[in-house]
Image (cartoon, rainbow, N blue to C red):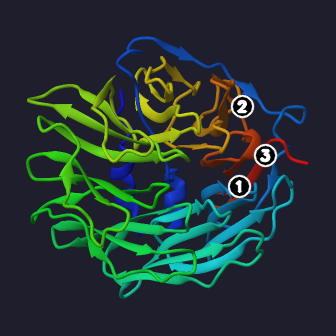
Amino acid sequence: MRSNVQPRRATVRRILGASLVTVLALGIVASGAFATTATAAGRESTATGTRADADGPWSVPTALTGTTDIVDVIDVRTAADGTVVAAMYRQVPATSQLELRVAVRPAASETWGAPTVIDTLKVGRETVQLLPAPDGSVTLTWVRAGSENTIRTSTLTAGATVWSNPVDIAQGTRFFDVTMAIGASGKAVAVWNQSSGRSTQIYVSERDGASGAWSSAVRLDDTPADTLEGVPQVLVAPDGSLTAVWSEYGPERQAVKAVDKPVGATGWTAPRTLSAPTSSAWAVRAGAGPDGEAVLVWTASGEPAGDTQLETVVRPAGSTEWGPIESLGAVDNVVDPRPLVAPNGEITLVWVDWRDTYGVRTVTRSATGDWSAVRTLSTEYVPEQFDAEIGPDGTVQAGWVQNATAGDGNGRVFLHASRVDGVWSAPTQLSRKPSGVAIGQVAGGPEGRATAVWHESVGSFTGQLWTAGTNLT
């Protein structure tokens, strides 16, 4: 029976605008997800778990916040020099406002700085993204709601201790699903969804260089009325060329769309369909490696009523063309995809789906194009919340929430596993004890380092953020 489990996107849409108290009580957070493989169908391995302790590779957990606040971790990312940044919400007591906060831990240090308030927002869960750039900076992007919505960004430059004043990218009504990418030259591009009546549209703004100004917004889609777009994705190639992709939800069929802007071009190409014309495709996610190799993954179903499949296309480094669609096998109730591309060309997918229960799955495509067997990382029921990142050396870090093991008490716990040199570690429990709400994020850093930040309940609605890391000095 799965009547108690709902797809995350539908659930999150319903609680946008709800208080953070309600959100935390539901245990809903940002996540990623996804995949299986045709060559690996039916061949699945399962990890066994271990518990973290002071003698293990993880540092002893330390508190990042106090015990009297309503807090939530949003994202954790690592800058090029190993500096770690965590983004979080704190609900202002006795108000309907959220403080958007960031905390910074210097490279290889165990000590975090005090959280900095970047903005104060209305209670809700609009898009917030942390993005490390090749120049060593970290950029925070978010939507500020008001009489007009504003897409804002602030940057912590390499070696700095103070975040820049917020810069407004665009103003309008009903902005959501903002995604940003930054290239090696500092070229930045932001894409987002904007609703209008019963339809949504995809818009883009660009910035040339770290000190440049953001361009006026340009519409990318050409969809008719009564058509909705999914979360857009954007890629910046090493040469500065741009690609944006999204899922188009029409009245009769869903499809994956893409547009490009080659180097030197003044405008974007017309949208083209990447998914098969005989299938419906949705929930596209994109990933790219440092050399420009890119991968798209989406969920698709054939006609008239075929199985739901995971499909992927790969664009080699330096190419402008996507390869053929590869079917990765039948799946059930997949959450959003998380494709990760290593410097050596390997592509690792991490996702949550339903089999005997909801669980975290992973599969890897070698540099020569062969897919591994599907592996299950989790050891108990997973309530659809997970995170996965890849470090500059290709080490994959995965963190997820699952039910506590029988005998450990009631509640949920946050676990971690890593893929190093092609081998996944056994899961390690990072939570100190089971909690009514367990929300966590993980970041990959240089030399295989990992950092995790997670939430543990204190009272009925209050909680505390905890953190730990590996290879700290």
Give the percent coordinates (x, y) of residue 439: 60, 49
Left or right of 322, for residue 183 = right
x 28%, y 29%: residue: 309
Nearest the viewer among 52 and 243 is 243
Q: Which residue type does callout 1 highlight? A: Val
Identify whether 472 is placed above or below 47. below
Left or right of 270, for residue 397 = right
Nearest the viewer among 190 and 135 is 135
Q: Which residue type does callout 3 highlight? A: Gly
Disc 2: which residue: 428
State whether residue 159 appears in this view.
yes
Q: Which residue type does callout 2 highlight? A: Thr
- The crowding category of the residue bearing disc 1, from other C-alpha atoms within 10 Å (few below 14, some 14 to 19, many at least 20), is some
Q: Report if the CB atoms under discs 1 and 2 are less than 8 Å apart.
A: no
Give the percent coordinates (x, y) of residue 310: 32, 31
Extreme residue in the top direction:
43
Give the percent coordinates (x, y) of residue 233: 38, 55
The label number, if any, that marks residue 458 in the structure image: 1
State whether residue 95 appears in this view.
no
Q: What kind of element bears circle 2? A: strand
Q: What kind of element bears circle 3? A: strand
Q: What's the CA distance linking mark 3 and mark 2?
A: 12 Å
The quadrant where residue 87 appears: bottom right
Disc 3: which residue: 469
Q: What's the CA distance linking mark 1 and mark 3?
A: 22 Å
